[in-house]
Image: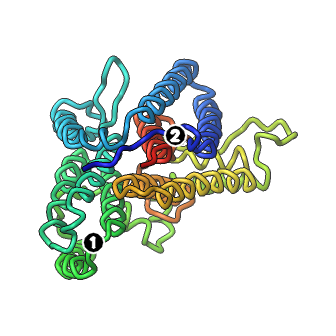
């Protein structure tokens, strides 16, 4: 007999809502600065406002629907996302031999971003369904197969960074699910030799790996190279990003009194998305950047607190999955902007420009709030 789950609006985590709202407002300012010389500045700003409105409406709707009901529909959502990913590969917009977007009513939609959230729901549902069989190796293979299909479709776009984000979320959810360490050990014993062989093949023999594009390998090799000339050619964007962040100084240029309107991030490609943290660093300086990182840390900690307080296994897994999703996106975006990681494309949650990314992040937060307001 299933226990009844009641909604308790007194348990709404306003710290999460306020923190997210502050980050969204910072994002609006950064986008305005990124497109300040663009003829489409007003159009882009309005689109982002519409995305924010849609995101808040979806949060309200999600909180009102029991997450158990949402998870019970996760298989249908999973099939829909697989279909959309396949459709994108065939009919998606082709930009520089990359197919990551589908245009809907004139608005670009990136299915890989929403796929991450759908997979969190479906994995939480499956872990809950198989929670008494997590000591079996074939259960791990089932979970891996569920994740492998969308990963392959996203790799074919190609979009390696989103695939790695999905892999990271999968590993964290599986590890936190209570799966047997013996099963994890056997899986690692099977996987690690394959991974090692791939790295050796790329580094020593320059072999072609399926689903891995040549330019992706070159980015990693350029990042690892100590050759200054290679760094200048391969990591130009990141060097410009570091200069922009450094020029922000302690307090940033937003509140500087020297009237300097020149911004070093203006010459960076994809400054509004992949290098959003370069705008943050130059506009808000070290103090402002630290404050924003603290806001992100607070948001993730609150997600983990809700997870720990949830008496429901599936709710815990949802919160842990969302936390992993946010951690990876933030770490990679900031790491790329500060040249701690190879150049790759992942948006900074709530700050980077992009409706799909923004709405997906807000949906993820809505799911955590959903878990938080329900009690048995």
- Above or below: residue 47 compared with residue 198: above
Residue 302: image location, x then y, percent: 56, 54
View extreme (right): residue? 257
Q: Where residue 205 sits: x, y (%)?
A: 20, 76
Locate residue 285 relative to residue 186 in the image: left or right: right
Q: Residues within 10 Å of mark 1 (few under 14, many from 20)?
A: many
Q: Does residue 62 lie above or below 211 as drawn? A: above
User: Residue 34 lies in what quarter of the image?
Assistant: top right
* 3D distance between C-alphas at marks 1 and 2: 31 Å
Q: Mark number for residue 179?
A: 1
Q: Can residue 236 be seen in this view?
A: no
Give the labeled residue for mark 2.
8
Q: Is residue 221 above or below residue 275?
A: below
SS at mark 1?
loop
| Upstream in sequence: badge 1 or badge 2 | 2
Q: Quadrant location of residue 257?
A: top right
213 on left or right of 231: left
């Amino acid at each position: 007999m299933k226990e009844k789950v009641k909604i308790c609006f007194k348990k709404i985590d306003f710290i999460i809502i306020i923190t997210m709202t502050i980050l969204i407002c910072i994002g609006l300012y950064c986008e305005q600065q990124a497109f300040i010389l663009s003829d489409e500045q007003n159009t882009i700003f309005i689109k982002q406002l519409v995305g924010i409105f849609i995101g808040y409406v979806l949060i309200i709707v999600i909180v009102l629907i029991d997450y158990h009901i949402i998870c019970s529909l996760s298989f249908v959502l999973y099939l829909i996302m697989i279909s959309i990913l396949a459709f994108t590969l065939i009919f998606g917009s082709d930009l520089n031999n990359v197919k990551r977007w589908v245009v809907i009513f004139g608005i670009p939609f990136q299915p890989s971003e929403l796929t991450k959230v759908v997979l969190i729901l479906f994995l939480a549902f499956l872990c809950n369904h198989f929670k008494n069989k997590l000591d079996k190796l074939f259960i791990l293979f089932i979970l891996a197969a569920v994740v492998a299909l969308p990963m392959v479709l996203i790799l074919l776009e190609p979009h390696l960074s989103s695939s790695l984000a999905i892999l990271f979320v999968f590993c964290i959810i599986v590890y936190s699910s209570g799966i047997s360490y013996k099963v994890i050990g056997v899986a690692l014993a099977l996987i690690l030799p394959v991974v090692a062989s791939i790295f050796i093949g790329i580094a020593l023999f320059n072999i072609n790996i399926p689903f891995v594009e040549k330019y992706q390998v070159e980015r990693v090799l350029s990042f690892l190279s100590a050759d200054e000339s290679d760094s200048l050619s391969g990591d130009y964007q990141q060097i410009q990003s570091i200069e922009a962040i450094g020029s922000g100084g302690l307090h940033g240029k937003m509140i500087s009194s020297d009237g300097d309107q020149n911004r070093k991030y203006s010459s960076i490609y994809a400054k509004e998305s992949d290098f959003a943290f370069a705008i943050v660093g130059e506009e808000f300086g070290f103090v402002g950047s630290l404050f924003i990182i603290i806001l992100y840390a607070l948001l993730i900690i609150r997600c983990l607190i809700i997870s720990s307080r949830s008496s429901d296994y599936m709710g815990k897994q949802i919160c842990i999955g969302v936390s992993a999703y946010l951690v990876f996106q933030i770490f990679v975006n900031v790491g790329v902007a500060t040249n701690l990681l190879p150049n790759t494309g992942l948006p900074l949650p709530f700050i980077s420009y992009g409706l799909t990314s923004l709405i997906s992040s807000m949906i993820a937060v809505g799911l955590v709030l959903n878990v938080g307001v329900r009690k048995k």
